[in-house]
Amino acid sequence: MLDYSIKKQLTKSLNLEIASRASRTQQALTVQGANLSTSCFNRSRSMATVVDAEPIHGGGPIPEYDRRVQAGKLRNDEHQRGEDVGIQPGTYASTDKREGIIQNFQNLYHELEKYDAPPVQHPSIESLKPTKKSIFSSLFGAGGSRSATGDIPNDLPRGLYLYGDVGCGKTMLMDLLYETLPPSVKSKNRIHFNNFMQDVHKRLHRFKMEHGNDIDGVPYIAADIAQQANVLCFDEFQCTDVADAMILRRLLESLMANGVVLVTTSNRHPDELYKNGVQRESFIPAIELLKNRLHVINLDSPTDYRKIPRPPSGVYHTSLDSHAHAHAEKWFRFLGDPEQPEPRPETQKVWGREIYVPRVSGRAAWFTFDELIRQPKSAADFIELVRAYEAFIVTDIPAMTHQQRDLARRFITFIDVVYEGNAKLVLTAEKPLSELFVSRDEIAESLMKQGVKHEHAEDAAAKHDLVHSVDKLKDSNLFASSEEAFAFARALSRLRHMESKEWVERGMGLEAQGGKLDKDNWTKARSRQMEDSM
């Protein structure tokens, strides 16, 4: 047991951490005139949601999956349709039979058809005041907020926790599930988990400013969120921050108590979350809650869906030679306004700050790497840029070695936002994608430090593919953590998806992809995206 002085010091440190986190979040995401605002929540959802170009037919995920397979939009995958996908022991699976992924979606669809979410009840401020238990225990969910949280309804459908490696189809499957939720679902939201937690910390900071630091705002904030969504879908669930770990169990439990059904994707099994984190034993109840209240499903499949061969679109150019500028110019004219092709500068405002966009044509923006990445920008800046523009040309991208990790991380954040926002991306780079973030020499040196002979290390480095070798390299000195390694591999996988002919031509109004109907539907989708992110 910790003595009182140690508890007090640890509690003070944790409070400083969450206050610092909230302050940073508020600086990046301040909403003028907002009161416990929902704008970040809505904006992030719109960035994450993929709207299909054709109307969704009824019947649930299985009929829609079959329709997309027949239309050639998806490949029939036995792993998804009914192979052993690994529903984990300890979940609420009714039998030992392991069903296909899509069948699990269909089961949830039928449960949601019969589910009537209870009315949301906001707890009183009095009920949120601390009990006589220690502040340390209340921070991690053992304090007085339990009475304010309430019980989880017996008829709450159990959600889904979908985990797997980069490229296993998580985004496509989440698209399918989200788009085929039954009409009985009165409200739904989809959001990247990091953006969701940023918004939660911002709300908590505002709540404590208004009601005092001793008041536990988590149940109240959870009730606010529950009013916006009966079904809440998270992309890329993870926990790497002590400030998140402090509140996650109570937050998830409070959402469920208010009748919210949770569906999430992740790179990790719940048992692998927040591994080696500060006071991880206090996070274990959150892991148990996920395993007990969500079906945990392993999506790992032999197929990497972002590497299925498609006609090359030619949006990425290597190297920075005399042809690079002509490549960027060609795509800028194609993706921009054909009637007014000459570039013009624009200025976008993000939370009271200005971002200079040097070259704009229509809804296409052109930056050099230095203009976009070397000048510090936050995820909020990139989200606003994707809201304003449909296509990005980024030129003069250098090879980023271990010494340029800050630039690489910022570029990866930009890639993630562009991908989630369904925007188009054209690049000119010094090195091919496989060597964009990690050089051959760095790979070889790392392998030699692990005991591989020089000649074998050089041969392996020449053939390396970070997306598929991430498990071998995640614990090497190339990355600060395994989470960083997965982030780098995910970025490369997404870049490969965005260079496909299908991605580039979607919504362009080209006859081969549906002509005017395709263009009109894409325009409507982007219009809704802008309205939702206002």
Image (tube, rainbow, N blue to C red):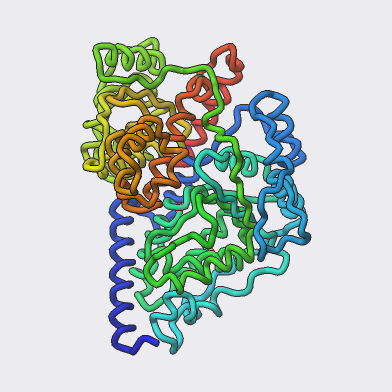
Q: Taking 410 as reference, is 154 above or below it?
A: below
What residue sits 35% from the left and 34% below the top? 461
Q: Can you say which quadrant of the picture contains the C terminus? A: top left
What residue sits 33% from the left and 89% below the top? 4
Report x, y in % for residue 455.
32, 34
Q: Taking 23 as reference, is 363 above or below it?
A: above
Q: Taking 338 as reference, is 22 above or below it?
A: below
The reply to whether residue 182 is in sight is no
Query: In the picture provided, is 296 more to the left or to the right than 318?
Result: right
The reply to whether residue 514 is in sight is yes
Q: How many marks?
A: 0
Q: Taking 202 as reference, is 409 above or below it?
A: above
Q: Nearer the viewer, residue 426 or 122?
A: 426
Report x, y in % for residue 316.
38, 22
What residue sits 77% from the left and 61% below the top? 94
Q: Nearer the viewer, residue 226 or 452?
A: 452
Report x, y in % for residue 160.
63, 54
What residue sits 31% from the left and 52% below the top? 480
Q: Can you say which quadrant of the picture contains the N terminus? A: bottom left
Q: Nearer the viewer, residue 332 or 27?
A: 332
Q: Nearer the viewer, residue 364 or 125?
A: 364
Residue 354: quadrant of the picture? top left
Report x, y in % for residue 500.
49, 23
Query: In the picture provided, is 249 more to the left or to the right than 185?
Result: left
Residue 304: quadrant of the picture? top right
